[in-house]
Amino acid sequence: MPQSPSRILIRATGAAVVAAAVALTSTSVRSQGVGAPMLNLEYDSFTLDNGLRVIVHEDRKAPVVAVSIWYHVGSKNEPQGQTGFAHLFEHLMFNGSEHYDGEWFEPLQRVGGTSLNGSTWLDRTNYFQTVPTPALDLVLWMESDRMGHLLGAVTQEKLDNQRGVVQNEKRQGDNRPYGRVNYNLYEGLFPVGHPYHHSTIGSMADLDAASLADVHQWFRDYYGPNNAVLSLAGDIDLATAREKVQRYFGDIPAGPEVDAVKAWIPVREHDTHEIQHDQVPAVLANRAWVAPGLNDRDRALLDLAAAALGQGRNSRLYVDLIHDRSLATQVNVSVTPFELASVVDLSVILNPGQPAEVASEAIDRVIARFLETGPTAGELARAVAGINARTVRGLEEVGGFSGKAVVLAEGELYAGDPLFIERYLDWINAATPTDVRDAARRWLSRGWHQVDVVPAGRYAAEPQGVDRSAGLPPVPDNLPKLTFPTVQTGTLSNGVRVVLAERRELPLVQVSMQFDAGYAADAGGTLGVASFAMAMLDRGTTTRDSLAISAEAERLGAQIAAGSVLDTSSVTLSALAGQLEPSLALWVDLIRNPTFADAEIERLRGQWLAVIAQEKAQPESLALRLLPLALYGRDHAYGVPFTGSGTVESISSITRDDLVAFRDAWLRPDNATIFIVGDTTLAAITPLLESAFRGWTAPAAPRPTKNVADVQRPSSPRVILIDKPGSPQSLILAAHVIPGLGTDRDVAYDAMNGVLGGSFTARINMNLREDKGWSYGVRTTLQGARGPRPFLLQAPVQTDRTGESLTELIREFEAIRTSKPIEQAEMDRVIAGLTRGLPGSFETTMAVLNSLMSSARYGRPLDYAATLTDRYEALRLADLQSAATDIVHPESLVWVIVGDLGTIRDQVEKANIGPIEIWNDDGQPVR
C-alpha cells in the first residue's frame, strides 16, 4: 500500500470475564548481554480465548498509540497459480468492511493518524498506524471489523479495481533500473516448489486469474485471530489495552489452524550464474547465498560478516572496488532474514563500460580471503557499534515500519518472544572474530546464485461482541495537541547562531550546521558543485583520510551526512549521547578541514557520473532533471536539475579550485546556524562548540547572493515527451510556479492541496487509482523553496491509459477551481488530518530537527510547528477555494511525460493539451 478518535460509553466488564478471556499475562524486563544497549522494551502480553496474541508497551513521550497487527501469512503460503495473492489481498483489506464500507485511510486521516500503511512479504502481512490516544477505539473498531467482518464488503468490482492497482505497482517497480533482478535471483536460489521460489508481487497471469472465491477462501484460511499478533505501543497501559481489545476482538471466531511451514534451507552443491538484459546504464552483479532463518544465531553472525564485507567505506568490497580501483559506484552486502531461510545478498554496480567479470573476480577474491581470516577486531567492533546504534535509533518511534510495536510483534510472531531483538543483540555483542569467520565458512562456501544485469540494446469466540450497527465509533473533539519542545537559542563568540531543543527520552543527539547555499548556488557556475562539494567533506580532512573518517564514525556509532537541498546545504551528525564529545570533534573536522584531495575527487567523479546515468534511466528522476529548465530557464537559480547532481558535462569539468571556491564563498560562520535536538542542554554543549570552532571567523568578502526572482507562469501549456522504448508505464510530471514559502497563505495552500492531490484520499488519487485502477498512486505536492516554487503533479500510469489519464487530470484541476468547488466535508477531513497528526509527526528527534531547520530556511518563527494547529483551524472554506484559484492553473502547466513514444504520442495528441516537443534525456529538442 502507499505510504500513501470521541468519547463512547464503555460497557463494564467484570474481572472474571476479563480473566477468562486472557490465557496469559506476562511482564518482561531486559536481561542485558555484554555490551548490548539498554532498550527499555518492557512489555505485557495476554491472549484472548480466540487465540489473538496481544502485546502492550507503555511509552508516554507523546499522546499517541501505535497499533500494529501481524498476520502469519505471506507469499510463501500461495499455492501454484496464485502468486501475488497475499499482496493483492492486503490491498483489498483497505477497501472497506461490512460495517464501514469506505476507504480505510479517510477516518484515520481525519483524526490525525500517521504511518498508515500495510505491507506483505514472504512470511507475513502486517497493517499499522499511529493515532492520537483518543482515537484508539476508532482504530481497534476498524481493525477488528476487517478481521471479523470483511467478506460481505468484498465485491467483484473492488477485486477488479485493486487487481489493476497491483498490476500498476508491478509495472512501476519493473520500470525502474534493476527492478526485475529479484525475480531471477530468488527463482535461481530456491528450487521449484520452495515457498520462496516466486516473488511476492506475483505474475500478471496469476493476478488476472484471481477470483472472488479465491479471496473469500484466503480470508477464511489465514485471517483468523489465532493467526495474528496485535501490538500496541505508546500512550497506553495494560488495563486499558486488555479491556478495549477484549471488547472489539473477543467475539471474532478463531479460524482454522494454519500448518507451520518447517525451515527449508536448500542444499546447493554448485554455483549458478545467469544474465538478465535490461535498460540500465551499467552492470549490476547480484550474488546470493541461502542461510539459516531469522531465529538462528548464525543469522546474527552473518549480519556482522556482511557489515565487514560490504557496508561502509571501510568494508572490504568498497575499499577494493571503489576506493582503491575505482571500478564500481555501489557495493552492498546484507542479510535479508526470513522464517524458513535467510538470504545473504551481495550486489555491485560497476562503472559504465566495466564488464561483469570485474565484479565476479573481486567478489571471489574478497570472499575467499574473508573465509580464510575472518574479520579483524576493528572490523568487528565497527559492525557491532553500527548495529547497536541503528537499533536504538529505530526505537525512537512507537510505530511505523521499524518502531517498538513492530519489533515486539515481529519477535512474537516468528520467535514466540517479543524481546527476541534483545537475544539478537546479545548474539551480536558477544560475537568474536572466530565466531563470525566460522559462520561465514558454514554458509558462504555453499553454492551461490548470481544474476548479472547488463545493459540491453534499445529493444473460540465470545457469545456477544461490540455493537457495530452504529458504524464507526465517534471521535472526541479534544484530541491531544502537539507539545513542541521549548526552543532555546544562543550565539557562539564567532557569531554562529545556535538553536537547541531538548528531548531526553533516548540517549541520542542530532546536530546540524545549515548554510544558506544549496544547489541554487550552482546557477551561473558549475552545475552540481554544491552537492559535489558537500559530498567531498567526509572524503578527507587535514587530520584523517576518507577511510579513517568512516572507521571513526563506525567506532562511535555516529552517522554524519553532508548534502544540499535547493536553498541550503548542511552537515548533520547523529550521535549517541555518551559519545557526543568525540562525535562532535569528528563532525567539526569535516566542516573546517576538508582537503578536497585530487584522488578523492576523481574517485567521486566516477561514481557521480554513474549516478547521473542511473537518474537518466529512471523515469521520475529523469523528468525531475529536465523540468526545471522548462519551468525557470537557464538564468534562474532554480533552473538546475532538481536532483542536484548537475550534468555529465559539468561534473566532468569540476576541479579542486571549484570546490575550494564553493567552500570559501558559502561554508562560513556568518552564513551558518547550528541546530541541536536531543539528550543534551545548551549549557552543556555550548562550551564544546566554542572550543571546536575557536578561530573560525568570517572572511572579509561579502556573502554571495542567489537569483530567486519571481517567474511568470506561461499563458499556455507546454508538452514535452521523452522516449523510453518498451516502458510498461508512462510517468506524467506537470508543474507551474507558485509563491515561495514563508507567507501567511502557506497553510491555505497546503490544505487545498490535501483535497486535490496531497493525500491518499485526495481527488486525483481516488480517481486514477481507486476508481479506475490506472495507477499505483498519483499525487500533487507543493515543493519547498524560498523563491517561486513548483506546484508539482506526479502520475505514473499504465501506458495504454496515458491519454485518458491526462484528460482526467486536467478535468480535476479545472473542476476544483470552477465546477466542483471544495466542500466543507473535504476541508474538515484535511484540516483534521493535518492538525491531529502533528503529535505523531514529531515523535523523533530528527523530525524536530528538520522542523527547526525548515523554519529557519523559510524565514518562519523557530517554533512554527507549535503554531500550525491554530493556523489551520483558523482557515475557512473560502480560504481554500481562494487558494485553488491562486495556485491551480492547468492552462499554465509544463508537462513532461516519459514513456514509450511510439505508444503514447497519438494518445497525447488526442488529449489536445498543446503543442508537443520531443526532448532527449539531456534536455535537447530532437524533433
Image: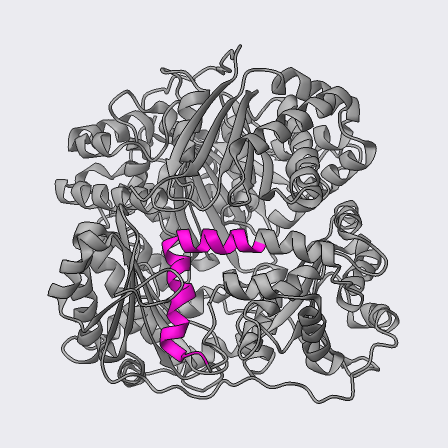
Up-down relation of residue 720 to residue 544 (above or below): below
Q: Look at 51% across and 15% down and name the residue there.
A: 265
Up-down relation of residue 872 to residue 290 (above or below): below
* Image quarter (top left, top right, bottom left or bottom right) of the C terminus: bottom left
From the image, give the main secondary structure of the stretch colored magenta.
helix
Quadrant in which residue 892 is drawn: bottom left
Q: Look at 45% across and 43% down and name the residue there.
A: 68
Q: Look at 27% across and 75% down and name the residue there.
A: 893
* Magenta residue check for 623: yes
> In this image, 208 relative to 623: left or right?
left
Which of 392 and 446 lies nearest the eye of the viewer? 446
Please name the colour scheme applied to the rendered image: one colour
Q: Position of residue 212 (x, y in %)?
A: 16, 33
Q: Position of residue 713 (x, y in %)?
A: 32, 84
Up-down relation of residue 349 to residue 656 (above or below): above
* Magenta residue check for 451: no
Range shown magenta: 608-634
Q: Can residue 501 be seen in this view?
A: no
Which of 56 and 454 lies nearest the eye of the viewer? 454
Q: Look at 68% across and 86% down and name the residue there.
A: 703
